[in-house]
Image: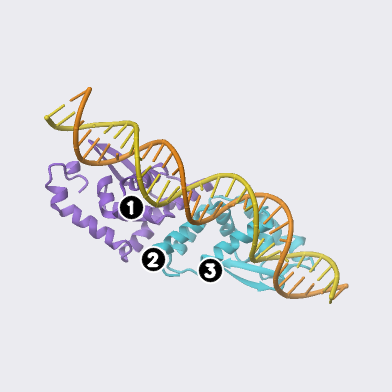
Chain colours: A purple, B cyan, C orange, D yellow
DNA sequence: ACTGAATATTCTCTATAATGGATATCAATG
DNA sequence: CATTGATATCCATTATAGAGAATATTCAGT
């Protein structure tokens, strides 16, 4: 993602200027996730999560791939861009404890029966 | 400016998520300016410039001081913050030529009769 | 085909913020 | 004290985006 136009910058900043989207980035920085896990960790209604994920993808911050019934989202590769720089900064902010509750809920999901051992566990371990 | 709350991050990103505000930061990165010079360089209506400057000050990105009739705005000191990091990144983006026309108009103002030699020149050289 | 789970889209409502024009304030000067 | 230039605020309008509910789509398995 290369920055030439003002709109590129504005688009990135707009994408980052919403709390639920920052919370999503906080979750995804550790690795890809399916929508349902983001929904669980954020404790938000599914349409809202889906819409914000779509927003971030539309603006180039996320990639997604379909895996059976699940859509796996992950942070888009973004070396040397304004977005990459902000990811590094946010990493620092997140590490200081912002959105810790979300991260804790996600951690429980990752190692819990609900994700790993249920027969409807998604992605066969790829995303959890 | 220390970042602890999500709103701090969101507020900074919102502040940066508008083209005219980025154009203002591009002008101010070289030093303080009064409103009229920003207005000249951006070729925007005075109320719009004034409002965006007020917005940036309200959200902690700018400081201002009164000097006779003029209000001098400058970028707020922001070491070690998310804003500081983005200033560094924007410096790079601006240096690549974004908003070059604004910078050129400002350069003309800085060395022109209109600013330096007229008897209503502001700030006695402090800001131009 | 039908079902159910996962995800996406649509709709309406609401809140926020930007725009443009007019006007108000404020400080210096005549 | 009236005026002028510089700046700030107000108002009405418009545009954008988030919220919440309902519905649609997609896919695997039966």
Quadrant in the picture for residue D8: bottom right
* Chain containing mark 2: B
**Which residue, given by chain and number where applicable, does mark 2 sit on?**
B5
Look at 37% across and 59% down and name the residue there.
Answer: A90
Can residue B35 be seen? yes
Q: Residues within 10 Å of mark 3 (few under 14, many from 20)?
A: some
> Which tag is nearer the camera, tag 1 or tag 3?
1
Instruction: Report if the CB atoms under discs 1 and 2 are less than 8 Å apart.
Output: no
Residue B13, image x and y in percent?
46, 57
Residue with the mark numbered 1: A24
> Disc 1 versus disc 3: distance between alpha carbons?
30 Å
Q: Secondary structure at mark 2?
A: loop
In this rendering, the answer to whether A47 lies above or below B109 is above
In the rendered structure, find residue B76 and report the number of the disc placed on it: 3
Q: Is residue C29 left or right of residue A2?
A: right
How many residues crowd mark 1 within 10 Å: few (<14), some (14–19), many (20+)?
A: many
Which is more N-terminal, label 2 or label 3?
A: 2
Q: At which x and y percent is residue A96?
A: 32, 66
């Amino acid at each position: 993602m290369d920055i030439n136009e003002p709109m590129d910058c504005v688009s990135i900043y707009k994408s980052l200027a919403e709390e639920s989207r920052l919370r999503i980035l906080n979750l995804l920085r550790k690795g890809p996730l399916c929508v349902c896990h983001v929904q669980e960790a954020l404790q938000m209604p599914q349409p809202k999560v889906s819409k914000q994920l779509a927003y971030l993808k539309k603006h180039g911050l996320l990639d997604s791939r379909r895996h059976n019934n699940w859509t796996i989202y992950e942070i888009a590769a973004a070396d040397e861009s304004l977005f990459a720089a902000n990811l590094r900064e946010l990493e620092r902010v997140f590490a200081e404890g912002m959105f810790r509750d979300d991260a804790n809920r996600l951690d429980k999901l990752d190692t819990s029966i609900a994700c790993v051992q249920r027969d409807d566990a998604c992605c066969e371990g790829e995303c959890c």
